[in-house]
Image (cartoon, rainbow, N blue to C red):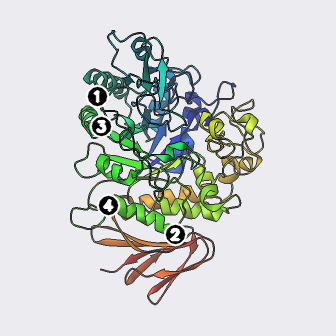
Amino acid sequence: MQWWRGAVIYQVYPRSFQDTNGDGVGDLPGVTRRLAHLAALGVDAVWISPFFKSPMADFGYDVENYREVDPLFGTLDDFDVMLAEAHRLGLKVVIDMVLSHTSQRHRWFQESRRSRENARADWYVWADPRPDGTPPNNWLSMFGGSAWTWEPRRRQYYLHNFLTDQPDLNLHLPAVQDALLDECRFWLNRGVDGFRLDACNCLTHDPQLRNNPPRPDDMPPTEAVTPSNPYNYQRHLYNKSQPETLGFLRRLRALADEYGDILLIAEIADDDSLKVMRDYAGPKAPLHTAYSFALLGPEFDPRHVTGAVDAFHADGIDGRPGRDGWPSWAFSNHDVERVVSRWGGRDAPPEFAKALIALLCSLRGTVFLYQGEELGLPEADVPYEQLKDPYGLNFFPDFAGRDGCRTPMPWEDGDRHAGFSTVDGWLPIPNDHLLRAVAAQAADPQSVLSFTRHFLRWRKARPELVTGDIDIVEATEHMICLVRSLNGRRLMVAIELAGRGGSVALAGEVDEVDEDHRLALGWVEGDRVTLPPYGAVFAWLRD
């Protein structure tokens, strides 16, 4: 079986995971030091956010050199040691590849910007101004303002879907595709097990540079974009999700297939990200799987979750969900408010965090857990004077940015630096995170950490939850009931998510109730499943 189907992949944001050299910033030796925590947690793989050489305008997502480790994080030797230790512990390693854009400091861009006549003149997206000197079209940056910046040496604008420091590569040019594939080959040769493809649907643009149309008033905001951002005034028909992207991804898939069971996963952010997910990871699609921001937004309602599942499987071969394509699902990552606070509020109890982990791990697909999610960490409140995220600084106070989910990992509760460093970290560690530190929770059998360790082991012993098909039975505003099935065995899952209890429809005749999941136990009465607050029923159904 392909290792990534139904796997649980743990995201490490290395700046905030573990500092070993006392500079207040996490590093690759710190990742190596804490891999035992991931192995004990029971995950199958680790995804490491960018550690490449970078000026850090966007904290590593602005790559200056794909083949060098930034000194902030260590060396290539440190990476090799980390990779070997992960493999020794049975963990796969997936790394971020940022292929849609580079840093301004990348040597490719430095050459491209010099003139219109050089070997890399067309490696980035350049365009002449309109007759009045304004940008060539109305495209906007996701981080605010125009997506075009003037380069006086060329007397042209260059495209950047994100910061001005992140010029977009021109993947319509075969030479650019070849160069990017070579960068991927470098890491495949070092032994990585897969790539998470950042901003994957931004790889190509409309060659005609047509204006995006206005967004209808009744159309919801683009996922992962704050409502006050002018980006939401457009339908993004031409600056992303172009058909040419799929051609490049097929080339990347062919390269990956040369190395065996390599995972390619797309990050998707778009107006209709679930449709794009199907294009990239559905039947006959070029990638193995994809995840979107569909479950990373503010909307919390089990019906929203089931709607996302159904939408991904809407084009099933035989009309039933679960028969084609392989999704991935995440409730948290480094770009959004932590899920416990986003969906449960500031005072969400630990039981809510447990119920969310159980739900996430019961959906059909590959599961992504973000560092600290296994601790039930709430969003950190970072004061304005300590904010680092340029996105948040641009939109404060309406949007405080992404620093609140990026604060250092709390390892020790008896240390003001939380065992993360010997000095103050690059972002502050809240007191309520210290109370939820790994050391404190490991000693508590009722903690979110203890629950997560148990539940992930428990899930692995039930293949229906790992690779089985999925059918939604019922979803209400605070409860969900679904069935996972494999080889004739059917496991019903019912979970309450609002802390007030209730009942949902029974999915069939119960053969046996599985009571070892460690959520509060519900029970079966007649044709209903009754659930206590944040409780669950996992039951085997008769044929």
Residue 120 against residue 328 in the figure, above or below = above
**Circle 1 sits on which residue?**
172
Helix, strand or loop for disc 2: loop
Please rate how many residues cluster around mark 3, counting C-alpha atoms within 10 Å: few if below 14, some from 14 to 19, many from 20: some
- Between the C-alphas of marks 4 and 1, the distance is 30 Å
Rate crowding at label 2 as few (under 14), some (14 to 19) or many (20 or more) other CA atoms within 10 Å: few
Q: Which-is-in-front pick, marks 4 and 2?
A: 4
Taking depth in this image into account, of 471 and 211 the one nearest to the observer is 211
* Residue pointed to by mark 3: 245
Q: Earlier in the sequence, mark 4 or mark 1?
A: 1
- At 47% from the left edge and 85% from the top edge, which residue is drawn? 528
Residue 252 drawn at (x, y percent)? 28, 33
Q: Earlier in the sequence, mark 2 or mark 3?
A: 3
Confirm or deny contact between disc 2 and disc 3 (CB under 8 A): no
Q: Position of residue 418 (x, y in %)?
A: 72, 40
**Closer to the observer: label 2 or label 1?**
1
- What is the C-alpha distance between the residues marked 4 and 2? 30 Å
Q: Which mark is residue 313?
A: 4
208 or 131: nearer the viewer: 131
